[in-house]
Image (cartoon, grey):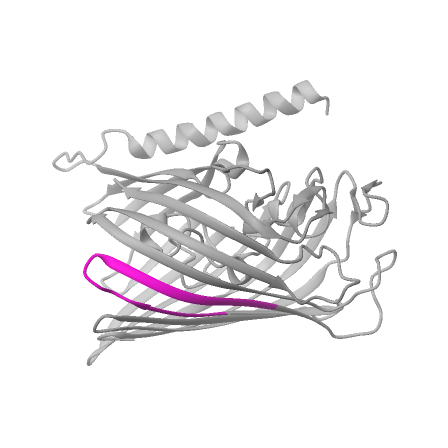
Amino acid sequence: MTKGLAEKSRVKSNFLKITALLFALMASNSHADDGPEFSGSGFVTIAAGKILGGTSANVGDYNCPCFVSDYAESAIYEDTGGVQWAPDSKLGLQGRVAFDNQKFSVTAQAVAHGSNSGNMDLEWLYGSYQLNSQITFHAGRQRLPMFYYSDSQDVGFTLPWTHLPPWLYGWQVVNYNGASMSYQDQFGDWVANANLLAGNEHRKNSGYWKVYGNGRQSITDVNWTHIVGGDMTLSKDWFEARLVYLQSNTQDVNVNGSWNYATLSYDPPTGAGPVADQRIYGFTLKANYQNWLLFNEFIYINHPGLTYNDFAQIIAAGYRYGKWLPMLTWDHYQGTVVTDGVLAGAPASTPNSEQTISLSLRYDLTTSSDLKLQYDSTSDNSDPGFNPRYGSSRLLTVAYDKSF
């Protein structure tokens, strides 16, 4: 496909996405008797950040010290010598149209990320049918429930941080196309929510691989097929616990080459990698006790047939004082080599480990807006031979969040 045809295809694709969203947003918040009900909402985050110091190097075609705030969207702060606005800034719009006394509805959400030059991507477009007060079926493009904050990860106002802790929340895909069934019920003082799902995801031009290994200019497609799994949340008063299990096949396709860390240039494309299994296990504990906010989340990903496994976790504590919420967060990632062999043509596989200590301060301006200040200090404890090895970094960010 020529560049002109590719651009026309991209414009057409974006046009269809925005058309679908506008359909859901039309007559926002209006109601007609015996007809469809329309509602609309949105959210915005205006964020600015500055690298304060760290390890200087050219890593994956990035000018470091660097701090990756969102792997999936290739949101990365570099050592530019000034303030950067793009990585964590975003605008989202959501629309919903309901029929048949709310039993059937269609939901759409599009988000423009500053890290993606402000291009708007369709994150959600799915239909829902409420069978009864407990069971609802969904089909279409939905959010993959890998994490506690998966559904709201783009909505800055719902988060205590300026950006989600990246070592836990930084993965290849965040959505899937398929079907799911949600269940909710109450057992005494306990509230239960469960979700079962199945589907596939084909992510073009993965932001994750631009940051994690293949380089800024690389194009790598990611295929997650035969996704099945679910999550369950139990809550009572101030306590909440969540379990998640997902499995799928995974495959990466290197389209235009990858960054060579020895020559500091791009190698020719390697094409499609092997199809491998992956199994994802997650667990979250959250407590809102009096003025205290305590949060612990971890995820473990097993890759049978590949040479590595992934583990990441967050431990966070905060104390609400009126409209203020100061927090201390520890975010850690560990990649573990499980065999001596590596994929054909790949460099030697070595362990990698990173951690970030974050100090954040949130101030609620209104019931739908806030201001945040955050300081992140990252240390890279990876084997010296592992790439990409970003090294240490220190980042200061401020953010304004608004839901409307």
Quadrant of the snapshot with the N terminus: top right
Seen at 83% across and 61% down, the residue is 343
Q: Is residue 71 visible?
A: no
Residue 238 belongs to the span the image colors magenta: no
Q: Nearer the viewer, residue 207 or 10?
A: 207
Q: Nearer the viewer, residue 77 or 235?
A: 77
Q: Say whether residue 237 is left or right of residue 376.
A: left
Q: Say whether residue 402 is left or right of residue 90.
A: left
- Please, is residue 264 above or below residue 375 in the view? above
Where residue 17 appears, as percent x and y from the top left, is: 46, 32
Seen at 46% across and 61% down, the residue is 358
Where residue 321 appears, as percent x and y from the top left, is: 22, 64
Residue at the extreme bottom: 188
- Please, is residue 158 above or below residue 291 in the view? above
**Which stretch did the figure color magenta?**
314-333
Where residue 238 appears, as percent x and y from the top left, is: 24, 74
Residue at the extreme top: 4
Where residue 391 appears, as percent x and y from the top left, is: 66, 57
